[in-house]
Amino acid sequence: MSDSAHVARFRELLARLLGWTFADNDAPPLAGLLRDRADDHGMSVGAYLARLASRPWEAELSVLVERLSITETYFFRHGEQFTALREDALPERADARSSQRILRMLSVACSSGEEAYSLAISGRQVRSDPDWIIDVTGIDANPAVLRKADAAWYSAWSLRETPDAVRRRWFCPDDGGFRVVDEIRRLVRFRRVNVAESGDGVWNHGQYDVIFCRNLLMYLTPAVTSALVERMTNALAPGGYLFLGHTDSLGRDPAGLELRHTHRTFYYRRAGGPPPAQRISSLPAPGESSAVAPEPGTPAPRMDDDIYERSLDLLRQERFSAALELIAVPRTGMPGARDQLLHGVLLAQSGRLSEAIELARRLSEENGLNADAHQLLGLCLEDGSAVAEAIGQYRLAAYLDPGFALPRMRLGQLARRQGDDRVAAGELERALELLAREDDERITLFGGGFGRLALTVVCRSELDACAVRP
């Protein structure tokens, strides 16, 4: 068997045993790991693969998990989600649990415990009464990080996004770092769980008020992802909340879940339970039109279709001034979202960046679920050197419409620029897959003058340049 065939077999076994998927760019480091593990056992590569496939080998799986896991995390990562948790999700769940006086939360792929302890602190902030039980479970397949989680000692770097008041209240200085106070440690327990397996006792029906599963789904096979999402949904109490990472999405219409948008972030609520305090009505599914519906009887002014198509054609020809003149023809009422989007693109392409940013912000504020508005704002902000905010807008665009290739492509390119080749490879591979089906009009609006073929070549070139290491 050739080296490439050995690596392909190794990838198949990792998918079956752990549910993990790997990009083609991961082949060289996987080949190195495969040789190392075979050598450590005094086996040929073929014999090692045969042993791995033949019967349970828990000790070896533990080593593979430790060697392959991505463990970088920190307390209160993606703070907007924790703000939504404290101000929206937990107060609502506490009202629903007022008779039991208990809040249960789960951190999936909890790594070294920062997220699980952040959940516990948030729970205690919302319900400080000691009569309330805050119960948090953290699960991960990596025994090494779980040992660190149990120890609850962290460097200052792990607390880099932790507010000073929170640090003073819930951490104590210890040996050059910080240890989580016992009051919080008692609220959290950790378990070793492989998400490719059933995880007995973890996924009981209606068990949790909140589940965090962030930036994991992109590393799992489609079958494992589907099974895990179903387990998490079923494990939520009616009205319970699911928070995913910015790289994860549940597609157009996740069964049993409702999309919510508050505090500049998106998350899901399980259907049923008491009505939420700030219900979002008539949410469009990602990928569907997200224009705000007018009041009955209100005219919905929009550009004449012929003028719109002619303006698009001028955009393709890079005749931006002529297109702006064409769409400037006075019309009664305010233009619709489609027309404003084209106007914003033309302003940006004409170098009138501040006007384009103002228009894009207005569009995204009028309807936070408009993926195209977030994409336009991201492009404008990136050109204005506000790269961090631009990344946030691209993430929102990709989150709202999982079939939207262009924000994935920009996220991959920016991740490469920042030296994060693993994230870049994941985003670029997804973009490459989606580009074949990308909407022609979106390519015209957001492709920067490149057509589908040219964008595909650029995307493939960026992906080939990623030097992914475990």
Image (spheres, rainbow, N blue to C red):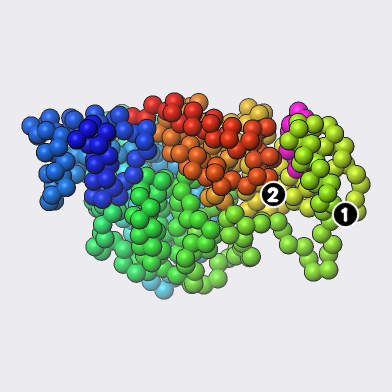
Q: Magenta part of the protein: which range?
A: 342-351
Which class describes the residues within 10 Å of circle 1: few (<14), some (14-19), or many (20+)? few
Q: Is residue 343 highlighted in magenta?
A: yes
Q: Is residue 338 left or right of residue 214?
A: right
* Residue 459 pos. (x, y %): 52, 33
Disc 2: which residue: 365
| Residue 367 spot, x, y in % from top left | 68, 53
Specify whether residue 394 is painted magenta. no
Q: What residue type is labelled 1?
A: Gly
Q: Quadrant of residue 7?
A: top left
- In the image, 258: left or right of 342? left
Q: Which residue is drawn at 22% across and 36% down?
A: 6
Picture quarter with the N terminus: top left
The circle on residue 333 is 1
Residue 389 in view here: no
Mark count: 2
Above or below, comparing residue 243 to residue 236 in the picture? above
Q: Which residue is drawn at 82% across and 37% down?
A: 323
Say which of marks 2 and 1 sits in front. 1
Q: Which residue lies furthest to the left in this view?
A: 42
Query: Which residue lies most toward the front here?
Result: 1
Q: Residue at image x 35%, y 50%?
A: 221
